[in-house]
Image (spheres, grey):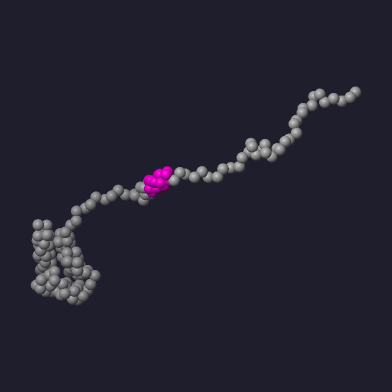
Amino acid sequence: MAATNQHAVIVSPPTNSAAATNAVLRDIRGPVPLPPELLWLWIAMGAALGGLLAVLIWNKWFRHAPAKPVEPSIPPHQRAKHRLADALALLTQPKPFCTAVSDALRLYLEERFEFRAPDRTTEEFLVELQRADQLNDSQKEFLADFLSRCDVVKFAKHEPSEAELRSLHSAALNLVEETAYNLQTVEKGAAA
């Protein structure tokens, strides 16, 4: 018997198969350019998002404490009066008392007249004081005498009586009140 191909599948021969494959598969496209009219919009949106992100990060990690309320400033003469009042507790100890009184007056002079009194020795301060015009001659003489009396107690181990210590205290308080009055008058005149 002769063999027949009646059950065979007939496949057409390939005709230019590379062209058929290229028709189905295409190469990738390049990047699509943004229209130049919208470029500024994308830049603005990116900047806004970056700024928002920076603010959120700042608030989350760098702002820990709420803002402190503003305290009213205390004038220098009031601070000096408080320091001088605190010094009275040391009245039975001459050296600490004289140190506290002279420091209170030196700090006051620095705050009130911008002298560098606490940073200098008495001699250096008195030289600077003679060149300054914020105090009159009697106040300069008083300061020279006052600071030298305090230095004698602090460094020469002089033991003054309680009356002498009270006299030093009241003299310092008088100078503060005298110069604070001038400050208040100047401030009122400037405000008017």
Answer above or below: position of 101 versus 26: below
What residue span does the magenta drawing correspond to?
Answer: 37-54
- Asked whether 87 or 8 is in front, the reply is 8
- Asked whether 163 or 179 is in front, the reply is 179
Residue 178 appears in the rendering: yes
* Residue displayed at 55% across by 45% down: 30
- Asked whether 43 or 160 is in front, the reply is 43
* Residue displayed at 18% across by 74% down: 128
Residue 67 pos. (x, y %)? 28, 50
- In the image, taking residue 28 as reference, residue 106 lies left or right, namely left
* The N terminus - image quarter: top right
- Asked whether 19 or 160 is in front, the reply is 19
* Residue displayed at 32% across by 49% down: 65
Residue 114 pos. (x, y %)? 19, 67
Residue 159 appears in the rendering: no
Residue 101 pos. (x, y %)? 17, 66
- Image quarter of residue 113: bottom left
* Residue displayed at 26% across by 50% down: 68
Q: Is residue 38 magenta?
A: yes
- In the image, taking residue 16 as reference, residue 58 lies left or right, namely left
What residue occupies the far right of the structure in this picture? 1
Count of numbered labels shown in the rendering: 0
Answer above or below: position of 30 versus 111: above
Q: Is residue 174 magenta?
A: no
Task: Kindly report the secondary structure that dominates the magenta region of the rendered protein.
Answer: helix
Residue 192 pos. (x, y %)? 9, 57
